[in-house]
Amino acid sequence: MNEKNHQGQKHEDRSDVSGHQQNREDKSSAGHANHDQHEGHSPAMFRDRFWFALMLTLPVMFWSEHIQNLLGYQAPEFPGSSWIPPVLATVVFLYGGLVFLKGAWHELRAGLPGMMTLIAMAITVAFAFSWVVRLGLLDAAELWWESSSLITIMLLGHWIEMRSISQAQGALQELAKLLPDTAARLTDEGEEKVPVTELSKDDIILIRPGESVPADGVVQKGESALDEGMITGESKPVKKSEGDEVMAATVNGEGSLHVKVTGTGENTKLSGIMKLVSDAQKSKSRSQHLADRAARLLTGVAVAAGVLTLVVWQFLGASIDFSVVRVVTVLVIACPHALGLAVPLVVAISTTLGAKNGLLVRDRRGLERARLMDTVIFDKTGTLTLGEFRVVEIAVVEGESEDEMLRVAAGVESDSEHPIARGILKSAEERQIEIPSAERFRAIAGKGIAASVDGTAYLMGGSALLKAEDATVSEPLEKTAETAAGRGQAAVYLLREGRALAVFAVADQIRDESREAVRALHERGIQLAMLTGDAQAVADAVATELGIDTVFAEVLPEDKASKVRELQKQGRKVAMVGDGVNDAPALATADIGIAIGAGTDVAVEAGDIVLVRSDPRDIPRIVALSQATHRKMLQNLWLAAGYNIVAIPLAAGVLFAWGILLSPAVGAVLMSASTVVVAINAQLLRRVQL
């Protein structure tokens, strides 16, 4: 798998695919803008404005008369010192508050007032009210520090929020890196090296051993085995000869191929996968934030309460100064200081908690939905299995030991680069068997290999080798080989002097952790499915051993996302777990995309959550984290908005007859207190044990 990653990462400049990718990103952004209050914003923008606003807010608070009285100190006085709060607060409003004013305008124009509208209303009322008082048009206390601190805290909250939102465009960039920069085109004059962008349909190109295929095509000449795992999920290299199709971004094996180009640019299967990822990511961005819905409700309540307050007090004969101060107090108290931090704080803490437990949360919406999932789809290769060959069963003739036969087999295969040979060697190493050196190694075309170990000549190969050597095979060995074939596994014989000494069933090995993960998810009542490009027999064997409920085998890359949608149409909340390029569209389409951290960068970029340890046992922990996060989020939303149930009536003056009346300054203190409570409650999430 590391080799695949390297192959995908070594090419950095992709002019043709990058342009294609940029068009897709533009379209995705356009769709996103219609639903996102952060259109055109970035974490860096909120960060810079927050620090600037904070530097100006501190002196505003220091020279504020209310803060001086509250803390019992006297700020230095000098000519013009009384203008420090209004001047600096005005700069904070114009620079820091502008983003909220623009956001409110977009919300109102779309007919969806929410968090931005509520923030803009509060800071504008406080700012305008303060200047009215400063100019002597109204007899009341100015609200400079309240206005500045409100803007500063809102910038901090949105900075935290933006950092927690995944932009989800990296997958397209990683997909583009899989294509090489240039290709070897064959013409009547010979071979010429050309940029991939210049390839056309029906061109003949040369694919040398180890090279990436630059375009879709059909083999015209040559034989080789291609690693298509990055695209199809197939664990074995796929043999290619004349008339067979090859796909862009797959990796050639040891042979050379002449390929006739059938698809380039947007017409390749790789490009099709890119489109699926883009479309799925775009559709995901339409989900609305829970805090926005709460803010929308609070906006209506605040406006209604403000209007009602003004009307009632004027009807009762109060002065206009008194009535306006009541309205300002209502609107200031209703502003979501705490509400703006309620969700981002929980998200930030849950993200940290997840990272400490091997769960990298890339998109908070995936984590929020994880508590609802009732179906988990696993990719087979590299997820439930290692994505590498191993010896999964050994049968030996009487008088021989498994370890001794594996030692000899590993010695015979030690000079071979075939993936099955690597699997036999790795199995011997994992058993801590010392591998002997081999002599007189030679390949037997189409049948196997031969070598001498410890001075004895051995042969290794499949059924074709048995026939060619007319070898004697015992019944137990034959049964083992037949069983392996029925499971879609390779059976490799070790021969000596025309007699089979052992047979090795070689397959993509199931992870030990997979069994525990399946059992834990079943205990939670979650249904499990497996999605793979492998043959049905291979898939069924893995599913039977693990206890998987549903199997989707021999699935083409472009069909994987449709299998996810098929389950979603049944009303299921689907999580997809995968590690390859071929899994990226399905990861993006699923309600929750879970990427194996050891997989390709594309899968990691497309996933909502990444299993850093590549351990499927971490999936139940995702559910636990999601449940704890949702619970704390609801608590914070109630703490942030719930105090308004009491504070808004008091600010409006319903208890004025009993001498209870909140001033705008006291309202700001209550608002700050609710922020502290929300912050403390969010910190309690750290105690959750996953």
Image: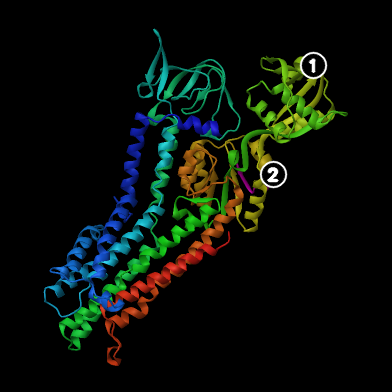
In the picture provided, is 397 more to the left or to the right than 330?
right
Q: Nearer the viewer, residue 579 or 333?
A: 333
In the picture provided, is 633 more to the left or to the right than 120?
right
Image quadrant holding the N terminus, namely top right
Residue type highlighted by circle 1: Gly
In the rendered structure, which segment of residues is drawn in magenta? 544-552
Say which residue label 1 marks: 455
Q: Mark 1 Cα within 10 Å, few/some/many (few <14, many 20+)?
A: few
Residue type highlighted by circle 2: Thr
Q: Earlier in the sequence, mark 1 or mark 2?
A: 1
Q: Nearer the viewer, residue 329 or 113?
A: 329
Q: Give x and y (percent) for residue 304.
A: 27, 75
- Whether residue 114 can be seen here: no
Q: Give x and y (percent) for residue 26.
A: 31, 42
Say which residue label 2 marks: 544
532 versus 313 height, above or below = above
